[in-house]
Each structure stands twice: as structure tokens, then as C-alpha cells.
Amino acid sequence: MKVTVDKDVCVGAGMCVLNAPEVFDQDDDGTVVLLDASPGDEEDTDVREAAHTCPSGAITVTEGP
Amino acid sequence: MTHDDNLLTFPGTRTCPLDPPPELTQLRADSSIQRVQIWDGSTPWLATRYDDVRAVLSDAMLSADPDMPGYPHHSAGSAARKREHTKMFVSLDDPKHRVLRRMVTHDFTVKNVEAMRPRIQQMADQLIDDMLDGPRPADLVEAFSLALPSLVICAMMGVPYEDRAVFHDTSRAMTSRTATQDEAVATLRQMREYFLKLIDRKATDPGEDMVSRLVERELQSGAVDLEDLVAILELVLVGGHDTTNNMIALGTAVLLEHPDVMERLRHTTDLDLVANTVEELLRYLSIFHMGRGRAVLEDTAVNGHELQADDGIIAALDLANRDPAAFPDPDSFDIDRANARRHVAFGFGVHQCLGQTLARVELQVALQTLARRIPTLALAVSFEDLPFKHESSVYGLHELPVTW
């Protein structure tokens, strides 16, 4: 899977870090930082939960190698 | 305005203290977004289903600004306060909302909140020591559930804990469904005066705290003006303790009704289980039981439902969190629920609770520490006789008499 984040719409709720801390972090002001744009299959569920629960729609997941 | 007999009254009356009113549960089953009638006779839309509630709260055409025509207020006090007072960013739309919110997100990142966990644990242990040294029965609200988040937010902000009466009063007036215009305005004036003095003190004698940082980094640089800063501080202080208080108190009462769950919490070393218990309590209890109000700025459609400019709409968080389409067997309390974290108890969209990470850690620490430290903890009155906050916009308990 491919992951992209939109820092401009991020509101710093932190749901991504709670769900998938291997893939997402927050900078000092709470804005999303993408640690891994092509996470492995073992992260699949956590990343999808992060995208589902992100309140501002800042995370996009697309299929692909 | 007279009552329209064809419309249900929102928020309605609970028949079971932990479940939404049955007629609203029925409304969710019957149809998607419908009109209801509220206290002032107005007839906003009500979204009750999980997908609709998320869509409403994500829609940029729907304003959180209570000055917009159609906005559904929850009381006369709320209506008055929002007219006379500088708005907190929870009541502002982007872009201004975003600018102000970002000034305080630093304090609530997952990393910074986790760093506070040992201190929160110490505070919880100290409060329990004090309660156990005192008389039985005790009021757990006074001794613990209100005290813990108040201590935490005071420490974080740099507000002296001795001054807590000021913000405890304001919280009561802000969440009361029966607050009059005068009460709401008077308590907010008192709080504003308090913060003006505190800001002065922090400007001359700064500490390692949120207020000092905001004064230095945002106020003195001109990024925020004084009135907006006061409104930010009010929001963080009030939002930072009363909701958590209600969740700890109500959560404890629920756990005491589920001894098997209490037993698991007492013995587990699995923080994920503690965390999921908290998520399930957030979903199950959904203490913002009057939902979140929005005003429609321009004609728009939410999940195919047409809304017109100047309509009001309420997103019912508690009903969404009991939607069987999102949560199987939604009325059962199940700490092993796989998708509990998908709840909308903290709202959704750009206004989703800023302090949710702190609330989670406080709840995890508070509930597991109670379970561990007081194995004989029990209600001192029957569950049905607990004083539930039916009249408040944030559900909870006025008192929680316990013994051990």
C-alpha cells in the first residue's frame, strides 16, 4: 500500500500515532509526519484504522506495491 | 413557538441511565436525517447514524459558529454567552479556528502526553491515599474524579490548583441546560478577569507551562490578541477537566456494575486491554449526549440528504456510537470490542477534541489505579439511585458515593 498525508488539513488529533506508530508520528506542533510511505503488509490493518479514524481526512491510502 | 406534535423532542429523556432515549434509538432505525424540536421551539435536523454523523462533522459547509443563522443552541445561557463573549475556537470556523488550535496542539501530542503519564500516576496514587485515609463512604467525584483532571490541567497550564473554584463554577454554568443568560455571562466574566491577571503574572514571572509559553510565543509576538488568548485558555481549562471528571465517575460506576471487567483490569499488565476498556467506555457512555450543533452556510447535501442555507443540524454522537451498522450488538458493554476506537465520542472533523490524548491517558491511569488499589471498592448506594446529570449538556454524575 501507498500512504500519503496532507499536513495542511491535519488538526493534530493524534489518532494516526495511536493506531500505527510505526508509520505515523507528530511534529512538535502535533502535525502528522509520515515515517513510512510504503508500509509492509503487517501494517495494513493499523494504517487503515488510522485513515478511518483520522478526523480531518489527512491520510490517504492507495493500493500498490 | 408552539410544540409540533409531529416532531420528536431532542434531547428527550432517558429511561435507562446509560442508554439514549428509546424514541431516538427508534428514530435512528426508522430513517436517516430528520427534523426534531429543541428547547427554544426551533426544529433543526438531527443526524443519528454513524456515517451521517461523521459526514456532518466533516462538511465545511456546516459551520460551528453559533452566531450563524439556524445554529441550534443547547440552552438560553449558551445562546447568550456566545453572543456576548469572544468565541473559543471550538465555535470558530477555519481558517481562524485552525490558527488558534495549532497554538496549543503541541501540549497534546501523543509523545508529550505520554511523558506526563508518570506524573498523572503519582497524582492518582496520592488522591487515593488521601481518600483511603478519610471517612467512608466517600464521594469519589470530589475525592478523585474531579480532582485528578483538575490537578493535571492546572499543572500543565501553570494555573494554581488553589484557584480551582473559579473554573469549577464556570464549567457548571457552561454545561447546564437550565443556565440563564445572567448566570452564563457572569461566570464567564469572572473567568476572563481571572485569566487577565494570570496572563499579567506569567508575562513578568514566566514558568515552564502552557500559559507562559503562549504569552511569550503567541501574545508578545502579536500572533494572537489578548481576548483570543483568554478564550483559548478558558477552553483548555474547562474542556480539560470537566469532561474527564464525568468519564472517570461514570466509568467507575459502570465498572463496579461489571465485576468481571474490574477483575481483569486489576490483574492485567496489558496496556492495550486497559486502553480498549477506555475506548469502549467512551463509546458506550458518549457523555456529550446533546451532540454537536452546526449551522448550514450554503445549500449542501450530506450523504444525499439535502440541507438548505440557514438550517441547523445536530450530530448526535451518542446515537452514532450505538449504531448497529457500525458497532455490532451496540448496547452491550464489551471491553474486547475490536473496533471500539472507531467511536465518535470526541466528535469528528476538524473540531474533534484537542485534549483527547490527555483524556485517554488520564482515564487509563485513573480506572486501572482504582481497580488495583481498592479491590473492595463498591457503590455506597444502589446504581439506580446515583445522581445522574440529566440536566447537563455533558452527562455524568454529581456525586459517586463509594465505600471499600
Image (cartoon, coloured by chain):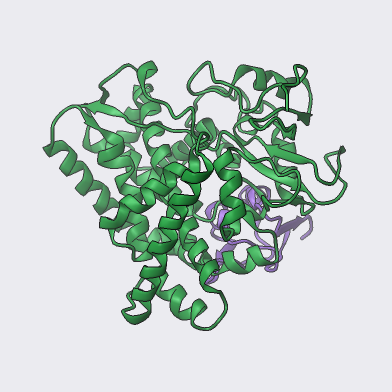
Q: Is the residue B152 above or below the residue B315 in the image?
A: below
Residue at the spot 60% in from the left edge and 51% down from the top edge: B82
Quarter of the image where the C terminus of chain B is located: top left
* Chain drawn purple in the picture: A
Residue B345 visible here: no
The x, y position of residue B155, in whole percent, is 32, 61
Extreme residue toward the front, this view: B182
Residue at the spot 50% in from the left edge and 27% down from the top edge: B334
Q: Is the residue B116 above or below the residue B1 in the image?
A: below
In front of the other: B220 or B190: B190
Residue at the spot 76% in from the left edge and 60% down from the top edge: A65
Q: Quadrant of residue B364?
A: top left
Q: Quadrant of residue B308?
A: top right
Q: Is the residue B230 above or below the residue B150 in the image?
A: below
Q: How many marks?
A: 0
Residue B87 visible here: yes
Look at the image and give the colour of chain B: green
The x, y position of residue A8, in whole percent, is 70, 68
Extreme residue toward the bottom, this view: B221
The x, y position of residue B321, in whole percent, is 61, 33
In front of the other: B205 or B283: B205
Q: Left or right: where does residue A28 sit relative to residue A59?
A: left
Q: Is the residue B84 above or below the residue B24 in the image?
A: below
The x, y position of residue B58, in whole percent, is 73, 50
In front of the other: B264 or A15: A15
Q: Left or right: where does residue B122 sit relative to residue B31?
A: left
Quarter of the image where the N terminus of chain B is located: top right
